[in-house]
Image (spheres, rainbow, N blue to C red):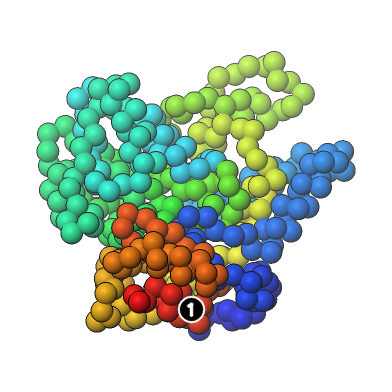
Amino acid sequence: MTYDVDALRAREFPWAARGERIYLDHAATGPLPQRARDAQAEANLNRAELWRVGFDYFWDGVVRSRELSARLLNASPEEMAITTNTSMGVNLAARALPFKAGDVVISSAGEFPANIYPWMGLEKAKGVFLELVPMKHRLPDEDALIAALDRPNVRCLTVSWVSFATGAKLDLVRLGAECRARGIWFVVDAIQGLGPSTIDVKACQIDILANGAQKWLLSPWGTGFAYVRRELVEALDPPAVGWLSMPASADFTRFLDYDYAFYPDARKFEVFTAPMHDLKAMAASLSLFLELGPANVEAHVRSLADHVVAWCEGRPGVRLITPADPLRRAGLMSIAVDDLAAASARLTAAGVSHTVREGGIRLSPSLYNTTAELDVALAAVEPR
């Protein structure tokens, strides 16, 4: 074990250490670690009595969130924009990239709506065509996605790194290389992968990455970030213009000295005011991942996923929807059984938080979960 899970549970997730709940639903919403709860509580108190702190107290959460999220991605803070959710980052890509009528955007069937509707909106607004590549055995077909890139007028590939329904993980290094070789923009929705898996946006040659932090990154609702490749930061105009996107607004004593000139970094894509107290909590949660080590977290979650795979192998009445290959999965594990409703009811009765999605029981363990907790959940899933 690369870090002490028991000590982590006692310090950051005391309710889990006390056995109050087995929480295996991080693919839906993650709980807050104690440090994020403390940061949020302090920020709320200071927001209630605002005269006790200066503006810099709250703005520090924004700055730290840019810095910490950049470290998770192997990016620079200048390439990071603070957002409120994944959809905001996907919309940034759809509306800022210079599409024209007749251009084609390629994606996979089975995508979560957050990575579909913004592109449908682009179809209506600009006459850009969205083409969905059929899945293969309910999983994204990576070879077919690459083949589709050679269709006429393809300008962009947009994919979820990890499928919300099946937990299937795409090879972003491979897809990014194929896109770059063809001069095609590569947009990634990372929300179901970042946290249980590590990512290097430079190695993957990603142009724009969108991520909400409320799931695997254990942060409040309404927090997230987008990565924009440095060359695109300089070339793109923001789809929505915020007053703090301009250096002219940095001097709060001279707001009327208008100067329509954006920051030369990803701050140009931010539209504030954001939930500042929640960003303080997001920065605290991101710090936990970096203290533990993203690769160590990935190794721990992979061991939990391996445990689920081993349990499913050869078990009557059980089918693992998620790929068994560790390179093709992250932390989200989907299991098919004949009576999903009954299995879900047994999980609830056993005190296990989970979801049912697209024909499977979805178990999504995180950095503080244990194999003992998984054993309780799997015993409930076992067909009767």
Residue at x 40% of width, y 68% of height: 343
Along the viewing direction, whichever of 166 and 293 lies nearer the viewer: 166
Q: Is residue 123 left or right of residue 32?
A: left
Q: Position of residue 117 (x, y in %)?
A: 35, 34
**Residue nearer the viewer, 256 or 92:** 92
Quadrant of the snapshot with the C terminus: bottom left
Please count the marks in the image. Answer: 1
Residue drawn where x is 58% and y is 47% of the image: 221
In what element is the residue under mark 1?
Answer: helix
* Residue 355 versus residue 84 in the image, above or below: below
Residue at image position (24%, 81%) is 314
**Residue 12 falls in image quadrant:** bottom right
Question: What x and y, as percent, mark residue 40?
Answer: 71, 52
The answer to which image quadrant residue 103 occupies is top left
Is residue 264 among the parts visible in the rendering? no
Q: Position of residue 83 (x, y in %)?
A: 53, 40
Task: Kindly tell me whether residue 266 is visible in this rendering.
Answer: yes
**3 relative position to 253: left or right:** left
Q: Nearer the viewer, residue 301 or 258?
A: 301
For the point 30% across and 22% down, which residue is it? 124
Q: Name the residue type under label 1.
A: Val
Which percent across, then down, holds residue 121?
34, 27
Q: Residues within 10 Å of mark 1 (few under 14, many from 20)?
A: some
Q: Image quadrant of residue 197?
A: bottom left
Which residue position is annotated with label 1? 376
